[in-house]
Image (tube, rainbow, N blue to C red):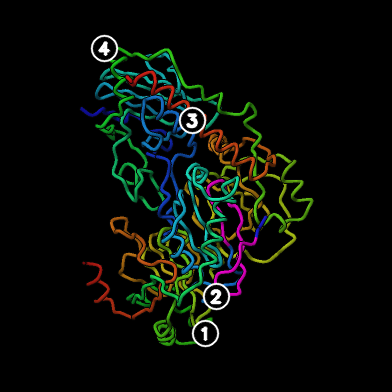
Amino acid sequence: MTEQVGYFGTDIPIKIYGLSEKSVTIKFGTAIDHDLLCLITDFNQLLLQSPFSGLITTVPAYTTLTVFFDPLSVMLSDLPGQVCFEKVSAHLNKIAQIKREKSSTIADKLIIPVCYGGDFGQDLSTVARTNKLSETEVIDIHTAGQYIVFMIGFVPGFAYMGGMDTRLSTPRKEVPDAKIPAGSVGIAGNQTGIYPMETPGGWQIIGRTPLKMFDVNRLQPSLLKGGDTVTFKAIGIKEFNAYAEI
Amino acid sequence: MSMKISIIKPGLLSTIQDTGRYRYLSQAVPVSGAMDELAHRLANKAVGNDDDNATIEFTYADASFKAETPVLISYSGDGACLVYNNELMPAEKPLFFPTGSVIKLIHNAIGMRTYLAIAGGWDVPDIMESKSTYLTAAFGGFKGRALQKADVLVGGSLLSEVSNGILNHLIEKSLTYPNWRISRESLLPENRQAIRVVLANEINWFDATSIISFLTNSFTIDRRSNRMGYHLLGKSLVRKVKKELLSTAVTPGIIQVTGSGDLVILMADCQTTGGYPRIAHVAAVDLPLCAQLKPGDTIHFSEISRDEAEALYLEREHDLSLITMAIGLKYIKT
């Protein structure tokens, strides 16, 4: 099912498999890892800069990059191969052969204000108790960390962020909440994330941001994208309300 | 002047859909769009529209609407039949109705979803380059929601040359339609319970007996089925490889296997990423068949190769382009 397409300026082998008639997935590795994320982000950027005829969009995830295309345009292209899988693979193989320069990704650094605890973070005490910390210590550790967005998934604009201090690791809830309000900041295992809209969810909620994480009226509706770096800043309720009024 | 209808009875779930929202997948915005893309496209073709014009997706029947102006519409799908003055209206054919006509959707036992196209396409704003409704996040389509009683829907004011040609032949004081129609049946296999699949990347995570069981047993569509996905009832599959799959992109048609070994077919509104191992994906040409499945319906899977699935897809697209050409030839003066 998988076929090796080569190397990407490193000694990491990458593999490619068909996902549907209109998509293929490139697999770069097997574990969540920051270097792998940079590799995927760079590859994605290179591909988007030199697309093949028929490329529609790409979806980065923890260890994969999935490439969506229009089969009719791909078949009409002069890429080598008899079928779409071969033609698209040929192009991806070409990208993989490009010598990788020093990582020059378009990743952004963002500071996200969060009002911790109280009604906005009803599970702050659970996270503190689970890790034998005070609530203030949880907030201090959470705001001291630098987080990396591994991917956007689950619902529009939901960023899965890694790099959390393991002292805050807390398992998901056994029974998910029926409604988690938009902006809620949660912890699940060793990851942290922000709910962009009201949905059911099982993460431990420690606070809420007044920022709109997803807004269809913005040019880029999702505030965060794969590869971005995030830090959190603790704010009080007054500041939260001031943001919310903007 | 734009064509217009008002909703008298909205039915169970009626939303505006087009061929989907593909360019925002990396921001976890689902594809959405018509569940039965084939019926959606045929309804559009029958009134001279582009395939990606917006249609109304009706779920089952029990709906009705009124022509507030003269309208040129068509419908396709298996959830309902259109009825006017107690007369059954033909599907996949342009239908001209004068102002004031009341058109009802009555139950069609075959399937679940029916698409209503209007010349010019339903005019709603583009959200992220698509008119499709995504109810979970309340955006797209008609005000981000399902249609309600008294909603007024307007057709696009810019008609294609073909739409204008059809309209000029049909415009009358009463119901009219031409003698031609698109043959949807000729595009669909005779046995609609046999769903062709291509085995997926994690196929070797399942034991041999489970793979054979997947390809030989029948599965029943469970009640827990909607635009996001269909849960299937049947023999659970056993995993040989127990490791976790790190979340990765998924797409409509993919068949995931849950922790308890049950099958879920992902459909139009599915999440953009998933962490369940995948046993197969439904061939793109058979996904419209899945869109018409109702809870209680029984299906079985048969394996084809990736290349066969692609060949079927390209053949289907070729057939569809011939239909567009044939309709164009009737109405465009050369």
Q: CA distance from mark 3 to mark 2?
A: 45 Å
Q: How crowded is the residue under tag 2: few (<14 C-alpha within 10 Å), some, or many (20+)?
A: some
Residue at disc 4, secondary structure: loop
Residue at disc 1, secondary structure: helix
Depth check, mark 3 against mark 2: the one in front is 3
Above/below status of A242 relative to B226 = below
Label 4 amino acid?
Lys
Earlier residue among tags 4 and 3: 4
Q: CA distance from mark 4 to mark 2?
A: 69 Å
Q: Please name the residue that numbered disc 3 is placed on.
A: B320
Q: CA distance from mark 1 to mark 4?
A: 76 Å
Label 2 amino acid?
Asp
Depth check, mark 1 against mark 3: the one in front is 3
Residue at disc 3, secondary structure: helix
- Tell me if B239 is positioned left or right of A123 in this view: right
Label 1 amino acid?
Arg
Residue B7 visible here: yes
Q: Position of residue B312 (x, y in %)?
A: 59, 36
What predominant SS class does the magenta segment belong to?
strand
Q: Please name the residue that numbered disc 2 is placed on.
A: A33
Q: CA distance from mark 1 to mark 3?
A: 58 Å
Q: Please name the residue that numbered disc 1 is placed on.
A: A167
Q: How crowded is the residue under tag 1: few (<14 C-alpha within 10 Å), some, or many (20+)?
A: some
Same chain check for tags 1 and 3: no
Q: Chain of mark 2?
A: A
